[in-house]
Image (cartoon, grey):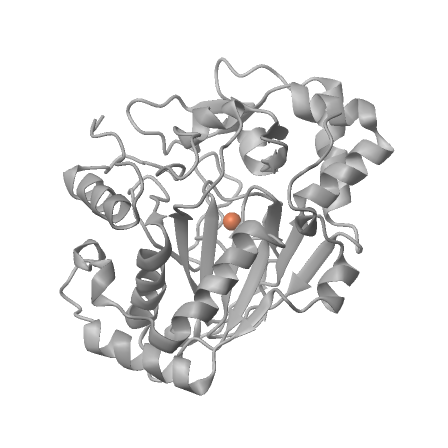
């Protein structure tokens, strides 16, 4: 089995995260007030987010702290929590624009679903998570451990639930090490066999309804993980997807068992004004089910952004079926969906140029 040369800090256990506070960041009053004024001045309810340019936003005294948090998630512990975004006196849409404005500085936003939306409101609109078209972000269900389909995800909390909705994070590096120690035979299967993931009927015209991928792979000495039980389960109903063999079923069961062990699974509640940042290649996440508030304006609401940052590393070749690009620093990942059009492509090309990244391919399928 290959040795792990990835930044060993991503292979944390729960006591490490309690003892090491280097992944926790917080904005001071000056930085928070600057962001509040910046976003209130920029917000125009009639203006689409695609229309805003990165150079319209100056994060000012918040810039370095936000950058440090993103770097920690991307190249360090795999996780960062930034507290103290402005929340009071900020509307839902202004708060969403704030997350968008942060993203404009540090990456190319990626589409997140069938509607080819580049930012998602994580809130319960009654979606059935277990349906073959189900998505977790629009339901109140307990979610399976999974990685989002992008390099970095930022999740900005506007409202928390009345109860529940606890965030769970496990290091896939630690899970891999545990798997190798306990069942090297199953680790081989997780690394060398393909698992088919359903696209939940959100595929673009040039994509199939599922894609194959190992659960763990390596590139340039780094470990990469991918897991989502719900999508592997729904893929089993798709024509052409081979049935999981008993060893594959055993490895998925053991993996989920490892991921929820108390020394592996870190839990936290996101508070209003918190920004959680994860590197999906080394972190798996989940959340508990929740009970919401009665008043619509109090209901749990988070803003989710998927980013391709300019300083990303090379992905394993086996990641290409989903990410489309595996080269370092490229515009990659996301769910292209069925509304990918010229305006979306133009946004991506403009952002890529701004960040010094190669322009994404111009073909619209
Ligand atoms: Fe997620």
Q: Is residue 329 left or right of residue 143?
A: left
Q: Is residue 259 above or below residue 221?
A: below
The answer to whether one can see residue 88 in this image is no
Q: Is residue 150 left or right of residue 253?
A: left
Q: Quadrant of the N terminus?
A: top right
Q: Position of residue 163 (x, y in %)?
A: 59, 70
Q: Is residue 151 above or below residue 96?
A: above
Instruction: Count how many numbered circles sit on residues in the image.
Output: 0
Taking depth in this image into account, of 117 and 138 the one nearest to the observer is 117
The answer to whether one can see residue 322 in this image is yes
Q: Position of residue 131 (x, y in %)?
A: 49, 38
Q: Position of residue 337 (x, y in %)?
A: 31, 36
Residue at 16% in and 56% down: 51
Q: Which residue, as the protein is rendered here, is positioned at the far bottom?
A: 29
Q: Position of residue 78 (x, y in %)?
A: 59, 52
Q: Is residue 359 left or right of residue 234?
A: left
């Amino acid at each position: 089995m290959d040795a792990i040369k990835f930044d060993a800090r991503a292979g944390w256990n729960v006591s490490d995260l309690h003892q090491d506070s280097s992944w926790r960041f917080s904005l001071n009053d000056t930085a928070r007030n600057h962001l509040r004024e910046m976003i209130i001045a920029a917000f125009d309810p009639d203006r689409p987010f695609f229309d805003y340019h990165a150079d319209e936003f100056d994060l000012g005294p918040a810039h370095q702290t936000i950058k440090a948090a993103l770097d920690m998630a991307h190249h360090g512990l795999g996780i960062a929590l930034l507290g103290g975004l402005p929340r009071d006196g900020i509307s839902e849409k202004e708060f969403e624009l704030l997350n968008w404005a942060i993203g404009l500085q540090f990456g190319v936003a990626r589409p997140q679903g069938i509607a080819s939306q580049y930012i998602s409101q994580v809130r319960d609109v009654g979606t059935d998570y277990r349906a073959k078209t189900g998505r977790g972000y629009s339901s109140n269900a307990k979610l399976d451990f999974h990685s989002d389909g992008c390099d970095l995800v930022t999740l900005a909390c506007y409202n928390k639930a009345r109860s529940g909705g606890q965030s769970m994070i496990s290091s896939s590096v630690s899970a891999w090490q545990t798997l190798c120690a306990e069942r090297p035979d199953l680790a081989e299967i997780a690394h060398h066999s393909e698992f088919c993931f359903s696209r939940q009927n959100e595929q673009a015209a040039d994509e199939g309804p599922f894609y194959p991928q190992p659960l763990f792979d390596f590139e340039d000495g780094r470990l990469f993980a991918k897991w989502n039980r719900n999508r592997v389960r729904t893929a089993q109903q798709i024509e052409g997807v081979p049935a999981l063999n008993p060893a594959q079923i055993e490895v998925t069961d053991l993996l989920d068992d490892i991921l929820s062990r108390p020394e592996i699974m870190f839990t936290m509640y996101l508070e209003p004004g918190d920004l959680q940042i994860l590197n999906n290649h080394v972190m798996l996440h989940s959340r508990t089910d929740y009970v919401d508030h009665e008043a619509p304006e109090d209901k749990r609401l988070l803003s989710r952004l998927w980013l391709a940052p300019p300083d990303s590393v090379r992905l394993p070749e086996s990641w290409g079926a989903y990410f489309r690009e595996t080269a370092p620093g490229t515009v990659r990942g996301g769910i292209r969906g069925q509304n990918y059009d010229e305006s979306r492509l133009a946004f991506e090309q403009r952002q890529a140029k701004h960040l010094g990244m190669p322009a994404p391919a111009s073909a619209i399928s």
